[in-house]
């Protein structure tokens, strides 16, 4: 079935081998029993994505929890401090230890992390305990001093996309009215799966579903829900986000160049959408497409969704109110048209009390076209 | 900066948003991909170049050992902006690239690399082919001063742009005959000795010596043109062949059998490159001829020169043609002369920087090979640096003015020393 | 005790030559081969380096000698399941059939396995159809092979005009667990490149190497010949391969001699895979009671003086099983082992031969 739908790709891949290559790296995670650890950036950039996670878990009837009590709320994993070199490794270890102790307090031995960088931080901290035998004792002491808690290493560190992957067939069979199929022609939609680097490249054997090269966690979702995942030369290329690139403005050109490289490489394969599981990738793959248009004139404008948004859309949840596609720079509406999901664009920026929150017109008026600014105008 | 403290930030967005910063030039555009793309050379250009003999056969056998780059004299002049690595250029050509990280005009064709190459790659021919791409196919740059010299050679047969009628003016004060059929020897001074004031003294000294030794010789003067050596090395193959044919026809018509040259470059070209175009003459460098004369007793050197002299082997006499001993024999025949050797002499001789078109190119102070060589000469304690090539003469006279201690040493051609010793 | 037999495990060139050499000395041998026919790997090689002679003919020559000899018995589709006793009186049980042979000496010439290139996932072998291994390229170039010697690429049968040959796949890499150099890949890759360029002079052949280890008599000359034919060698290990919609393969490497990344698009990419000890080497070692080294190849008694003796008395080693080597060296090994075996048997008490 895969071969037919690949069209021109039928003879360039060995479909069976492709179906099996990722099976060397099967990640075993429980169906439920997770402490959900939300993300920082995701809540800012694409707030609806994170807001949907509790909804999805409840829909599936999973046993999960988060932010149990005010004094045991989840915190940032300190990934920005760790990757930005502004904190010590002990601070990161203590922060993650506290989060793990929250999970144990809730009675879970598994954590589900919403952000891939966070996932990477948790995985790395876990690995450190394995490498340094005396480390646990030290951190035990520090954690006790810091907030009077005790912790154990969690049994499973999962990403929320892992959980969604685990339940993908159930979602498809029991809950999803829509499929990733073009409504008019019946053609499966072609999706690019972009997995965050810290998910599959750090510990491909233990932490990644499908390994580093042919990671399956998002591919599996696309395939299960009727689409086709495409393979293009820069598939494994980083989106270029990386705090050192995107947060230091002179280095932003590197991020733009990485995204451009991926776009150039994926274009001949005619993708319909991109799905990501990392908030950083999502932000940059989405927004840099616009920057590329301004800088080079080339409009790729491939709708970029997070996996949660994909789930939400296919479950038939409201595209604006619940899934939050209005936050996207690249318009997602064309994709909705293809799938056949109805939407009312006039309602896209309605606030809680029904008032229109859109400032689009002012923004367009206030932002001159590229190149009209004077040289030397600096930010304060 | 705090967004929250400005309530009307939406209206004042011009000064606040990152877009402004991004597009007013403070941020780079999309960084270009610096990868070399393989096998994407323009097919037409490749075919055209192959038809010109630039089909990759020169660089094919190179296995990137790096001996050429290591032995190249330019390793003595480290420079962040200009480098010369034959190895790198060979590999770039193997990949089909036409732009090079190195400066192809730096090469002085001194032959160090060709001598050492374990695979026998003809590196000088390779450099020539790169320069042909620039000169003849117009792909890439040619330095202005070189272009001017070549233009002059094409127009009036000498690189200075001086009238061709004045080519024999150096001989006005000397009793020199015009060459006629039957004359035993043609003396071919070359462009520098014919026109350049300093080099003219060498031609005059040579003619003087030949007269005093009773040698029958003549000159062709304004009828001859440049031998074309530097033109060929600069990549202008068609001009070179025109010059060669002109000279060959001239020599043949005049019944020339034996030629003495002042310049090793003319020597090399007449001896090794003219036969391809039908030029079959016996070529002798004047130092060889003088050595012969001294051995046969036809030249008596009686005036003493109580000086310490060091000799610089020119690339085109030494490495290219293996003539190391005759010039030294000549020097040692001068009574009272103490001959000392510099480091890097014989086939390790450090190029003065004049070959391969280098004589026409500008080089900055501190980046001249002749400066380094002159310092080596000064260190031997010699008071005279003996040369046997007009390019070396010109370069060392130049260096003498700027190198520390340059006023303690004189640059003299072997002909001048011999002439003074008669 | 007269008539001590020699059992030779492995019917490849090393094993066959051992049998032939032993036959010339007058010693009887039994050649055990697990596959259907003798010849090992070399029977599939049309041309072998460095002089481009025929591997098939070499094998056929050895085979015919074996057939005609009354002293050599070849048993195909057979394996050894158990070895009892001690030298010079081994009891070797074979399967299928449970036959038991008494032998004085055992020779191990079990050869090698090609490295499974699909475990280096970044190259996409097995996923992208136009990425093949050196062994497959050998078959494509063979006039008696599946494409009659035409270099047709797997996806669409188009004649490949741009070919990349990737060296060191599965060798010299900690990541795949093979730290050693497989010795012959640079040479066979160069040979294949020459084969391609000879057949298709207009083709572009790029070899991506870490080192070019074509050492041996005639090998350096073969490398030079390859270069002079216009085969471009690029120093830089290939990092990854991707695929384009029309099946072309994109290759990414760094040209370390220029210090710049390079990318190329090729019709066909051949992974010059290294070799590992044969898959049942560990099993054989256990059955025979001999030692293997960390890299999986059999250990010899003394690598300087007794390179063909195993760690157990009466068991000898030949060919690629002790370490990868070119075919002439395997033949030498066969003759060398025959001499060692003869010497061993001659020293036995009561032996008249």
Image (cartoon, rainbow, N blue to C red):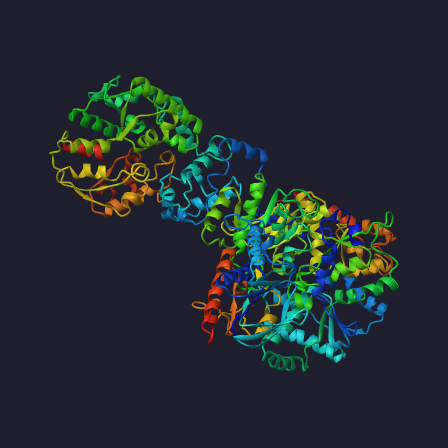
Q: Residue at x 33, y 38 (%)?
A: B320
Q: Is residue C172 visible?
A: no
Question: Which of A236/B78 is in front?
Answer: A236
Report x, y in % for residue C78.
64, 66
Q: Is A95 left, or right, of B179 in this rendering?
A: right
Quarter location, residue B367 = top left
Q: Is B243 left, or right, of B98 in this rendering?
A: left
Question: Which of A40/A153 is in front?
Answer: A153
What is the tally of numbered marks visible in this picture? Answer: 0
Report x, y in % for residue B373.
29, 44
Question: Which of C148/B254 is in front?
Answer: C148
Q: Which residue is drawn at 48% across and 71% down?
A: C345
Question: Which of B322/B9 is in front?
Answer: B322
Q: Which residue is drawn at 48% across and 53% down?
A: C214
Report x, y in % for residue C327.
52, 56
The relative height of residue A209 versus residue C201 in the rendered view (above or below) is below
């Amino acid at each position: 079935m895969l071969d037919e739908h690949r069209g021109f790709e039928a003879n360039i891949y060995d479909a069976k081998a492709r179906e099996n290559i990722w099976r060397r790296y099967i990640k075993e995670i429980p169906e439920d029993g997770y402490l959900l650890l939300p993300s920082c950036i995701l809540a800012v950039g694409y707030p609806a994505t994170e807001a949907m996670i509790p909804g999805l878990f409840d829909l599936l009837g999973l046993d999960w929890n988060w932010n149990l009590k005010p004094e045991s709320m989840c915190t940032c994993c300190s990934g920005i401090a760790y990757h930005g070199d502004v904190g010590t490794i002990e601070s990161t270890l203590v922060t993650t230890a506290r989060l793990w102790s929250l999970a144990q307090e809730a009675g879970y031995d598994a954590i589900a992390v919403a952000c891939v960088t966070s996932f990477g931080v948790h995985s790395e901290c876990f690995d450190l305990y394995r490498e340094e035998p005396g480390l646990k004792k030290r951190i035990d002491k520090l954690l006790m001093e810091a907030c009077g808690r005790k912790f154990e290493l969690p049994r499973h560190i999962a990403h929320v996309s892992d959980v969604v992957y685990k339940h993908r067939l159930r979602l498809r069979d029991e809950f999803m009215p829509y499929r990733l199929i073009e409504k008019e022609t019946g053609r499966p939609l072609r999706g690019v799966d972009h997995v965050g680097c810290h998910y599959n490249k750090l510990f491909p054997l233990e932490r990644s579903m499908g390994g580093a090269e042919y990671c399956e966690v998002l591919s599996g979702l696309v395939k299960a829900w009727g689409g086709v995942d495409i393979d293009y030369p820069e598939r494994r290329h980083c989106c270029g986000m990386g705090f050192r690139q995107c947060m230091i403005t002179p280095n932003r050109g590197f991020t733009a160049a990485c995204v451009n490289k991926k776009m150039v490489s994926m274009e001949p394969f005619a993708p319909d959408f991109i799905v990501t599981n990392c908030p950083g990738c999502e932000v940059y793959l989405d927004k840099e497409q616009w920057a590329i248009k301004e800088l080079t004139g080339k409009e790729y404008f491939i709708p970029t969704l997070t996996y949660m948004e994909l789930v939400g859309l296919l479950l038939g949840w409201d595209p604006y109110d619940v899934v939050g596609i209005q936050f996207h720079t690249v318009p997602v509406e064309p994709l909705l048209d293809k799938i056949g999901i109805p939407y009312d664009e006039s309602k896209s920026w309605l606030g809680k009390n029904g008032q229109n929150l859109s400032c689009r017109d002012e923004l367009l008026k206030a932002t001159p076209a590229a190149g009209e600014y004077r040289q030397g105008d600096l930010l304060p | 900066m705090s967004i929250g403290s400005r309530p009307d930030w939406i209206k004042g967005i011009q000064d606040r948003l990152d877009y402004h910063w991004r597009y007013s030039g403070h941020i780079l555009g999309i960084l270009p991909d610096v990868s070399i793309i393989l096998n994407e050379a323009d097919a037409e250009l490749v075919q055209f170049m192959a038809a010109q003999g630039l089909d990759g056969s020169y660089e094919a056998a190179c296995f990137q050992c790096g001996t050429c780059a290591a032995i190249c004299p330019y390793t003595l002049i480290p420079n962040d902006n200009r480098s010369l690595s034959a190895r790198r250029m060979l590999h770039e050509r193997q990949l089909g690239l036409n732009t090079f990280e190195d400066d192809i005009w730096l090469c002085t064709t001194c032959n160090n690399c060709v001598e050492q190459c374990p695979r026998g790659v003809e590196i000088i021919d390779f450099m020539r082919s790169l320069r042909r791409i620039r000169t003849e196919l117009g792909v890439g740059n040619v330095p202005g001063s070189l272009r001017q010299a070549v233009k002059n050679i094409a127009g009036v047969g000498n690189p200075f742009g001086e009238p061709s009628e004045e080519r024999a003016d150096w001989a006005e004060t000397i009793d020199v005959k015009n060459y006629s059929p039957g004359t035993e020897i043609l003396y071919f001074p070359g462009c520098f000795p014919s026109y350049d004031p300093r080099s003219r003294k060498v031609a005059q000294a040579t003619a003087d010596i030949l007269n005093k030794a009773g040698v029958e010789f003549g000159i062709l003067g304004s009828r001859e043109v440049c031998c074309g050596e530097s033109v060929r090395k600069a990549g202008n193959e068609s001009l070179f062949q025109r010059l060669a044919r002109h000279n060959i026809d001239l020599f043949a018509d005049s019944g020339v059998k034996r030629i003495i040259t002042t310049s090793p470059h003319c020597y090399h070209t007449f001896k090794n490159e003219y036969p391809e175009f039908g030029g079959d003459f016996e070529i002798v460098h004047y130092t060889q001829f003088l050595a012969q004369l001294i051995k046969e007793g036809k030249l008596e050197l009686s005036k003493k020169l109580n000086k310490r002299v060091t000799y610089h082997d020119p690339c085109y006499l030494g490495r290219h043609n293996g003539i190391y001993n005759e010039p030294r024999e000549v020097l040692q025949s001068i009574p009272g002369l103490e001959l000392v050797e510099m480091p890097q002499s014989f086939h390790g001789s450090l190029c003065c920087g004049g070959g391969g078109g280098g004589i026409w190119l500008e080089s900055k102070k501190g980046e001249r090979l002749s400066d380094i060589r002159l310092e080596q000469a000064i260190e031997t304690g010699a008071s005279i640096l003996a040369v046997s090539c007009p390019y070396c003469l010109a370069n060392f006279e130049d260096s003498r003015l700027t190198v520390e201690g340059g006023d303690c040493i004189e640059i003299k051609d072997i002909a001048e020393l011999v002439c003074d010793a008669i | 005790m007269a008539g001590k037999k020699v059992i030779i495990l492995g019917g490849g060139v090393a094993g066959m030559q051992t049998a032939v050499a032993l036959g010339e000395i007058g010693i009887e041998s039994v050649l055990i081969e697990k596959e259907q026919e003798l010849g090992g790997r070399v029977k599939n090689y049309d041309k072998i380096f460095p002089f481009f002679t025929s591997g098939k003919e070499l094998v056929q020559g050895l085979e015919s000698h074996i057939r005609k000899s009354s002293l050599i018995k070849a048993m195909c589709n057979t394996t050894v399941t158990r070895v009892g006793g001690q030298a010079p009186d081994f009891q070797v049980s074979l399967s299928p059939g449970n036959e038991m042979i008494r032998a004085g000496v055992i020779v191990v010439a079990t050869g090698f396995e090609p490295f499974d290139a699909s475990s280096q996932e970044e190259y996409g072998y097995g996923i992208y159809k136009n990425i093949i291994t050196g062994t497959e390229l050998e078959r494509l170039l063979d006039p008696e092979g599946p494409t009659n010697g035409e270099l047709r690429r797997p996806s669409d049968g188009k004649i490949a005009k741009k070919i990349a040959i990737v060296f060191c796949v599965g060798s010299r890499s900690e990541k795949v667990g093979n730290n050693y150099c497989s010795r012959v890949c640079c040479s066979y890759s160069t040979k294949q490149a020459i084969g391609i360029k000879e057949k298709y002079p207009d083709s572009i052949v790029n070899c991506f190497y870490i080192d070019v280890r074509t050492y041996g008599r005639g090998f350096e000359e073969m490398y030079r010949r390859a270069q002079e034919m216009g085969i471009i060698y690029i120093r830089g290990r290939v990092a990854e391969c991707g695929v384009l919609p029309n099946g072309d393969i994109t290759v990414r490497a760094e040209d370390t001699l220029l210090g710049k990344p390079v990318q190329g698009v090729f019709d066909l990419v051949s992974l010059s895979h290294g070799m590992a000890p044969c898959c049942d080497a560990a099993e054989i070692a256990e059955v025979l009671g001999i030692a293997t080294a960390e890299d999986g190849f059999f250990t010899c008694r003394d690598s300087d003086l007794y390179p063909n003796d195993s760690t157990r008395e009466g068991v000898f080693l030949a060919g690629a099983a002790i370490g990868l080597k070119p075919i002439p060296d395997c033949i030498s090994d066969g003759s060398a082992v025959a001499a060692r075996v003869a010497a061993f048997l001659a020293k036995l008490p009561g032996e008249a031969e």
